[in-house]
Image (cartoon, helix red, strand yellow):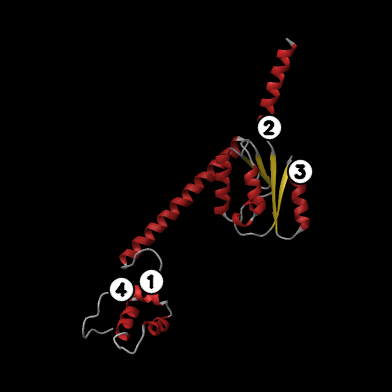
């Protein structure tokens, strides 16, 4: 009986250990060590067991190695804590992306200054609002792209990189090359493009009509 009880208690203990979650803090400052210490104190009071400290002023999440380490370490059920939203994301786009990643990983989020806590019903609503803002942001970007392409097509242009040579420049190059003493290299240099670029432009262009003007 005691052996069965021991096995049961070990099983319960193992399940409990597997379910343990962790409060993880994230700090970002540029150079102010005093501000760094202040953030550490706030996160320790909030119960953070591990704190990632970023002493960089990167404009995007891609430039912050400690943030990457934290994202690799967080697990389902963990709680990420920051002192303020601007410590986590330098732009709305970064913030929305990180919130979406937290949600997908099953990670909760707390921002002390804004009193956002996704472990509460009100905080969970904030999480969903971030998701809705992300969808809205993506939709607006798609709509702007579609409108831009439609406007460009209406003006006789298509999306993509701007051509290296205009139609007028290509026509000028064709006329210049009618002179047998003029080389492709000199014409390419005249317009500031590579020989291969000029060759391609001439290949795709309509042929000159005898007596045509620029």
> Badge 3: how crowded within 10 Å, few (<14), some, or many (20+)?
some
- Observer-side mark, 2 or 4, equals 4
Identify the image quadrant of residue 61. bottom right
Q: The N terminus is located in which quarter?
A: top right
Q: Which mark is residue 44?
A: 3
In the rendered structure, the answer to whether residue 62 lies left or right of residue 40 reads: left
The answer to which of marks 4 and 1 sits earlier in the sequence is 1
**Marked residue nearer the N-terminal end (1 or 3):** 3
Identify residue for label 1: 163
Q: Extreme top residue here?
A: 1
Marks 4 and 3, how far apart at CA: 68 Å
Residue named by callout 4: 203
Task: Say which label, 2 or 4, has the lower sequence index.
Answer: 2
Q: The residue tagged with tag 1: helix, strand or loop?
A: loop
Position in image of residue 184 (x %, y %) = 36, 82
Left or right of residue 135, residue 62 in this image: right
Badge 2 is on which residue? 20
| Rendered view: 14 above or below 104 | above
Q: Residues within 10 Å of mark 4 (few under 14, many from 20)?
A: few
The vertical placement of 32 against 77, above or below, is: below
Residue 16, position as x, y percentages in the image: 68, 27
- The local crowd at label 2, few if under 14, some if 14 to 19, many if 20 or more residues have their Cα within 10 Å, is few
């Amino acid at each position: 009986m005691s052996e069965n009880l021991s096995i049961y208690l070990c099983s319960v203990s193992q399940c409990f250990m597997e379910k343990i979650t962790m409060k993880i803090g994230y700090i970002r400052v540029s150079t102010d060590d005093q501000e760094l210490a202040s953030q550490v104190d706030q996160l320790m009071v909030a119960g953070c067991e591990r704190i990632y400290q970023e002493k960089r002023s990167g404009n995007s999440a891609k430039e912050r190695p400690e943030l990457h380490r934290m994202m690799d370490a967080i697990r389902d059920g963990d709680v990420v804590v920051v002192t303020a939203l601007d410590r986590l994301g330098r732009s709305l786009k970064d913030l929305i992306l990180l919130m979406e990643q937290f949600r997908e990983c099953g990670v909760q989020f707390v921002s002390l200054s804004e009193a956002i806590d996704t472990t509460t019903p009100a905080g969970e609503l904030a999480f969903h609002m971030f998701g809705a803002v992300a969808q809205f942001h993506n939709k607006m970007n798609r709509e702007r792209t579609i409108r831009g392409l439609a406007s460009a097509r209406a003006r006789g242009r298509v999306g993509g990189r701007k051509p290296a040579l205009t139609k007028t420049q290509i026509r000028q190059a064709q006329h210049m090359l009618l002179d047998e003493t003029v080389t492709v290299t000199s014409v390419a240099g005249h317009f500031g493009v590579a020989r291969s670029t000029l060759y391609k432009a001439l290949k795709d262009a309509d042929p000159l009509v005898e007596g045509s003007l620029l």
